[in-house]
Image (cartoon, grey):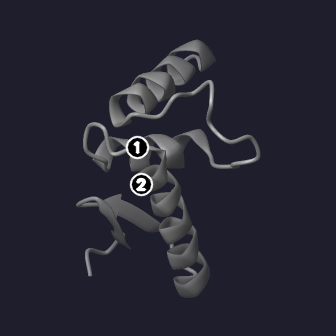
Amino acid sequence: MSDERRFGELLMEMERVGIDPHNFPAGVTVSHELAVRILRVLPNGAGPEAFLTSIREERQLIKSSGEQVAIGSGAASRADGS
């Protein structure tokens, strides 16, 4: 996927969730893949707080488990389904 398409996909998901990309806090570092994965499970209009909370939860799971984790059902869960 081209960078332009990846950026467009990210913007579209941000807008659907209710995040204004022009006012999003600078300094939030997250990979494109993680951002899109989190955004896709958030409901329409969830807002930036839900997105930032999901990023924190994801990072805590990765740090505490040392495992690769996936986002599912609106909350972070282990990739093995447990």
**Is residue 23 toward the left or the right of residue 11 in the image?**
right
In the image, 37 versus 28, the foreground residue is 28
Residue furthest out toward the right:
27
Helix, strand or loop at disc 2? helix
Residue furthest out toward the bottom:
64
Residue 1 appears in the rendering = no
The residue sitting at 53% across, 55% down in the picture is 52
The residue sitting at 39% across, 63% down in the picture is 70
Relative to 62, is 33 above or below? above
**Is residue 49 toward the left or the right of residue 26 in the image?**
left
Residue 12 drawn at (x, y percent): 41, 22
Helix, strand or loop at disc 1? loop
Relative to 65, is 55 above or below? above
In the image, 37 versus 24, the foreground residue is 24
The residue sitting at 61% across, 19% down in the picture is 3
- 3D distance between C-alphas at marks 1 and 2: 6 Å
The residue sitting at 34% across, 29% down in the picture is 16
- For residue 79, what is the image quadrant? bottom left
Residue 10 drawn at (x, y percent): 49, 29
Residue assigned mark 2? 50
Relative to 34, is 75 above or below? below
Is the Cβ of the residue at disc 1 closer than 8 Å to that at disc 2? yes
Residue 61 drawn at (x, y percent): 50, 77
Q: What residue type is labelled 1?
A: Gly
**Is residue 41 toward the left or the right of residue 49 in the image?**
left
Residue assigned mark 1? 47
Determine crowd level at label 1: few under 14, some 14-19, many 20+ residues with C-alpha closer than 10 A. Answer: some
